[in-house]
């Protein structure tokens, strides 16, 4: 197929047009993501010595401001749905909790290494905990590295040992738990294992050089970073893994280049978004990356292995300059904020999601469906009535024609439909709301801003 542009009568092949369209669409995707975030801040850590395996915790930090505490080589931070952030404070042998008011307390461990028993979590010893998973309701799972155990801390602060792997975890710090908490994936010795109560531990994939973190993508597949090989893998079966990012090198490629052609030096952190785009964090590279749904890598948060790279608090995260150093993990909390763990000096940083809202609230009608939209920073509520009583499908479609399936709750009472969409799962942008209920179709453009 050949197309002639009208103005200059220039001959353009369909392949070139497709390439230009794809570049424009996914560049817009990243820019839309960037526009949905704002201020960079430090939520825990004042900066320690960074001198290796040193426990710098002091009892005076307990119950005081988290930004005045010294963290000891933190490896991971993750939040519950209430906004409490939990930190694997590895070299202080404890798990910290930072509440919504910014106060830090010890959730598990006694600040010295040991092998505690089941009981009250902050009265039982841990040994170099460097993996952590937090449920929506605040249940903790801990990779207790030195004791070769995975621990669980319930909502009442009681700790139990889920299992012990006598082979140990190697140098890995990977831990992930299914939403219903019946399956645990974790780092073995150069392998990813899967544990269930009925089947124990089984091998998922091996042949890794040095595992970083693991997570699930939006389709349920396990994704693991190999910090020593500088690669990111998706585990597609119990016998196969494929590379989805990285070249194995320590340099090359870069911003705007395909993730499979870009080097991610010491990649450790990985976190997937609802549309299967994902964040990566590199330790030696000192950067946070975003890989869009076409597989193109973009620098989200830049850094450098220098003392002065810890900057930018109180400013928009995209202001020029190096902001982070030695990044160990990146996660997105339930409010849509990005949490970044800096290892050496011990900081937890937050890139805040902008307040959500709908530019156009109100009521629209067409020949078939009467619809009302109400927005808040937490959720978008769509109410509509149809002539039939069957369940409708509700979808968001962006300007590139991509369908989004954000977290939503659906209620149907006779012929009145209510859909509640979690705002933290939607990026800023212009969308069409498409509702299909039998023969009745509603299709309206609206603009969502964060």
Image (cartoon, grey):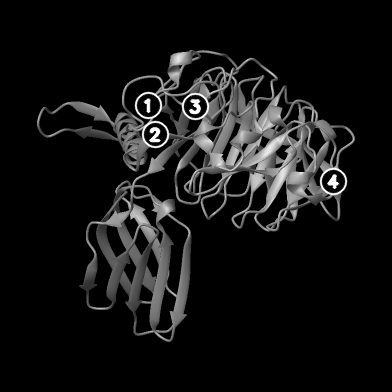
130 lies above or below 376: above
The residue pinned by badge 2 equals 40
**Which is more N-terminal, label 2 or label 1?**
2
Q: Identify which residue, 434 or 99, lies in the foreground.
A: 99
Q: Identify which residue, 357 or 22, lies in the foreground.
A: 357
Q: Is residue 118 left or right of residue 410?
A: right
The residue pinned by badge 3 equals 259
The residue pinned by badge 4 equals 163
**Which is more N-terminal, label 2 or label 3?**
2
Foreground mark, 3 or 2, reads: 2
Judged from this view, the residue extending furthest toward the front is 60
Foreground mark, 4 or 1, reads: 1
Mark 1 vs 2: CB contact within 8 A: yes
> Image quarter for residue 52?
top right
At which x and y percent is residue 315? 32, 31
Foreground mark, 4 or 3, reads: 4
**Which is more N-terminal, label 4 or label 2?**
2
> Image quarter for residue 30?
top left
- Residue at position x 45%, y 37% in the image: 350
Q: Is residue 400 left or right of residue 118?
A: left
Q: Identify which residue, 94 or 178, lies in the foreground.
A: 94
The residue pinned by badge 1 equals 312
Task: Please indicate, yes or no, whether residue 193 appears anywhere in the rendered image.
Answer: yes
- Residue at position x 60%, y 29% in the image: 71
């Amino acid at each position: 197929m050949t197309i002639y542009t009208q103005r200059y009568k220039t001959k353009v092949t369909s392949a070139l047009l497709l390439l230009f369209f794809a570049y424009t669409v996914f560049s817009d995707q990243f820019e839309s993501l960037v526009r949905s975030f704002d201020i960079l801040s430090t939520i825990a850590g004042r900066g320690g010595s960074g001198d290796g395996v040193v426990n710098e915790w002091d009892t005076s930090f307990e119950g005081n401001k988290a930004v005045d505490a010294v963290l000891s080589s933190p490896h991971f931070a993750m939040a519950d749905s209430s906004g409490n952030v939990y930190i694997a404070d590895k070299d202080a042998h404890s798990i910290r909790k930072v509440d919504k008011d910014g106060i830090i307390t010890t959730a598990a461990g006694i600040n010295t290494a040991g092998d505690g028993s089941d009981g009250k979590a902050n009265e039982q010893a841990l040994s170099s905990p460097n993996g952590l998973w937090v449920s929506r309701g605040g249940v903790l799972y801990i990779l207790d590295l030195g004791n070769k155990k995975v621990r669980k801390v319930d909502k009442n602060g009681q700790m139990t040992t889920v299992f012990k792997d006598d082979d140990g975890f190697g140098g890995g710090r990977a831990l992930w738990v299914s939403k219903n908490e019946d399956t645990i994936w974790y780092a073995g010795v150069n392998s990813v294992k899967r544990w269930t109560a009925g089947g124990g531990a089984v091998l998922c994939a091996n042949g890794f050089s040095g595992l970083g973190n693991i997570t699930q993508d939006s389709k349920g597949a396990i994704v693991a970073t190999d910090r020593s090989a500088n690669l990111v893998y998706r585990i597609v079966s119990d016998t196969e893994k494929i590379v989805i990012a990285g070249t194995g090198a320590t340099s090359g490629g870069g911003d705007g280049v395909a993730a499979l052609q870009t080097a991610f030096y010491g990649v450790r952190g990985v976190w997937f978004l609802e549309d299967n785009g994902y964040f990566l964090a590199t330790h030696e590279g000192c950067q946070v990356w975003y890989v869009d749904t076409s597989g193109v890598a973009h620098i989200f948060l830049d850094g450098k292995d220098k003392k002065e790279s810890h900057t930018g608090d109180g400013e928009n995260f995209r202001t020029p300059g190096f902001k982070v150093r030695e990044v160990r993990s990146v996660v997105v909390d339930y409010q849509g904020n990005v949490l970044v763990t800096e290892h050496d000096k011990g900081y937890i940083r937050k890139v805040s999601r902008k307040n959500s809202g709908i530019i156009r609230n109100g009521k629209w009608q067409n020949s078939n469906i009467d619809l009302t939209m109400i927005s808040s920073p937490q959720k978008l509520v769509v109410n509509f009535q149809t002539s039939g009583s069957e369940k409708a499908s509700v979808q968001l479609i962006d300007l590139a024609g991509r369908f989004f399936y954000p977290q939503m709750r659906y209620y149907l009472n006779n012929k009145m439909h209510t859909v509640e969409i979690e705002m933290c799962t939607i990026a800023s942008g212009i969308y069409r709301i498409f509702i299909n209920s039998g023969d009745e179709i509603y299709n309206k453009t609206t603009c969502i801003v964060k």
